[in-house]
Image: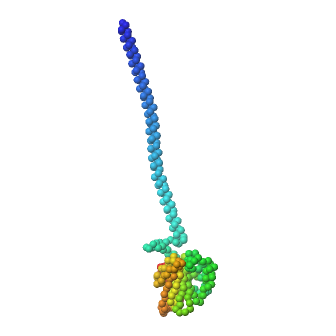
Amino acid sequence: MATETANDTTRAAGAASGKTTARKSAAKKTAAKKAVSKKAPAKKAATKKTATKKTAAKKTTAKKPAARKTTARKSATRKAAAKPSAKTQAGKTGTGKKTTGDGAARSKPRAVAQPVIRRIWPLEADSFRRHLCRLSREDRILRFGRPVTNRYIQSYVDRIDWFRDIVIGAVVDGNIKASGILTPIGWRLPLEGSAAVAVESEMQGYGLGSELTKRLLTIGRNRFMSRVYMLCLVKNERMYKIAEKYGGVVDKFRDETVEAQFDLSRPTAATITREAVSEGLALGRTVMGRVPVIGALANGTHAA
């Protein structure tokens, strides 16, 4: 009996210990489940954070090309706005230019009144002075070799010997727009002469300088001049073209001046008739009036 009771007690103790171990294992399992359940929301939160970061990065990368597109659109609109403004300014100032094959800029033809190239007489000295005073600073430098004032121009006009010096001009509506003067040098034959040409800015590009030089050379030839000189600056490229056109020889000096020398032959009946006919036609056109043309001279040619 004692052994049975002892066995029963040991069994009971073993059952109790098994129950306690089972309870402990169950408690451990529940604790592990709770820990897992706690970790799961933390992992979900971490995944949510990473997902939000990825979406934010995608949004920023999507915004960058959009910003680039907006900047490109702004630059395109600025260019489109700048193009008509440049065109309107060129149209207002009348300085729209086209480039020829050799890269030189060439002005567009403008509507101008047809000039009358004729002799300028002493009674028109004041008109000749106003023409020289209308020259721009750059044109005055090309004409006189340096910048001059209106007072200097007045004294220059007063020193002209109208009965010996020959002054011709391109007259438009009674105003001299371009001029040329031929001054004899010395009194013994064969004579020599000094020539100078000036063209206002609005009349440049139509060949007036070339036409006036041609008339002055014809007049000098008919006055028994053997040689005509024209002084200009080195940067006056138009003078080079005129000298090449009429067979002049160009000599450069150290003080940035250039001398074009034209050797003339003796006068002929053709040259004397040419001068008389041109003066007669100019007088007739002055009396009858002028015809407006677009971008052309009296002979219908453009500048060289």
* Image quarter (top left, top right, bottom left or bottom right) of the N terminus: top left
Q: Is residue 89 visible?
A: yes
Q: Is residue 221 visible?
A: no
Q: Is residue 86 left or right of residue 7?
A: right
Between residue 37 and residue 3, name the one nearer to us: 3
Count of numbered circles on the image? 0
Q: Is residue 10 left or right of residue 137?
A: left
Q: Residue at x 54, y 70 (%)?
A: 92
Q: Position of residue 63 (x, y in %)?
A: 47, 50
Q: Splitting the image into 4 quarters, where does residue 159 fall?
A: bottom right
Q: Residue at x 42, y 28 (%)?
A: 32
Q: Residue at x 60, y 86 (%)?
A: 160
Between residue 174 and residue 141, name the one nearer to us: 141
Q: Position of residue 125 (x, y in %)?
A: 61, 84
Q: Position of residue 147 (x, y in %)?
A: 59, 76
Q: Position of residue 51 (x, y in %)?
A: 44, 41
Residue lying farthest to the front in this orientation: 254
